[in-house]
Image (cartoon, rainbow, N blue to C red):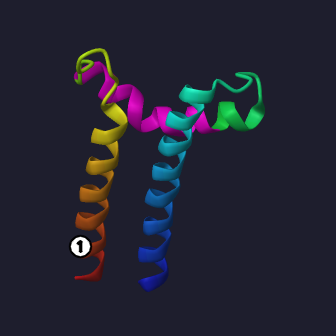
Amino acid sequence: MSLFVQAVQMLFGLLQIAILLDVLFSWVRPDPYNPFVRLVAQIAGIVLNPLRRVVPPFSGLDITPIIAMILLQIIESIIVQVLRG
């Protein structure tokens, strides 16, 4: 069971890293055709795109990455607690 918990934690960690990289890429504007940039955008989009439909911009700022990170932390904590019993 511990291996499964570690896999879940790794998955959530990778999602969070993808979101952070997506935010950084939005600031520096790398080549959008770069395969790594596209992969990061696709992975981060799994979480961010549904949230962007629900959360409006706050004073012109996209706050969905912040909300996504908080939600991912909460969901991860709940799943890990359930898995550990």
Q: Nearer the viewer, residue 75 or 36?
A: 36
Q: Position of residue 24 (x, y in %)?
A: 55, 37
Q: Nearer the viewer, residue 65 or 8?
A: 65
The image quarter containing residue 83 is: bottom left
Task: Please tell me whether residue 66 belongs to the stretch shown in magenta.
Answer: no
Is 63 on the left-hand or right-hand side of 22? Answer: left
Q: Quadrant of the C terminus?
A: bottom left
Q: Quadrant of the N terminus?
A: bottom left
Tell which residue pokes out farthest to the top in this image: 60
Which residue appears at 70% of the width and 27% of the height?
A: 30
Question: Quick one: label 1, few (<14), some, or many (20+) residues within 10 Å?
Answer: few
Task: Identify whether 3 is placed above or below 32.
Answer: below
Which residue appears at 24% of the width and 74% of the height?
A: 81
Which residue appears at 30% of the width and 15% of the height?
A: 60
The residue type indicated by label 1 comes to: Val
- Residue under label 1, please give it: 82
Task: Identify whether 67 is placed above or below 4.
Answer: above
Task: Please tell me whether residue 50 belongs to the stretch shown in magenta.
Answer: yes
The image quarter containing residue 52 is: top left
Instruction: Give the main secondary structure of the magenta stretch.
Output: helix
Magenta-colored span: 40-54
Is 51 on the left-hand or right-hand side of 33? Answer: left
Which residue appears at 32% of the width and 62% of the height?
A: 76
Q: Position of residue 17 (x, y in %)?
A: 52, 51
The image quarter containing residue 49 is: top left
Labels in figure, total: 1
Q: Position of residue 70 (x, y in %)?
A: 27, 49
Q: Secondary structure at mark 1?
A: helix
Q: Position of residue 32 (x, y in %)?
A: 70, 22
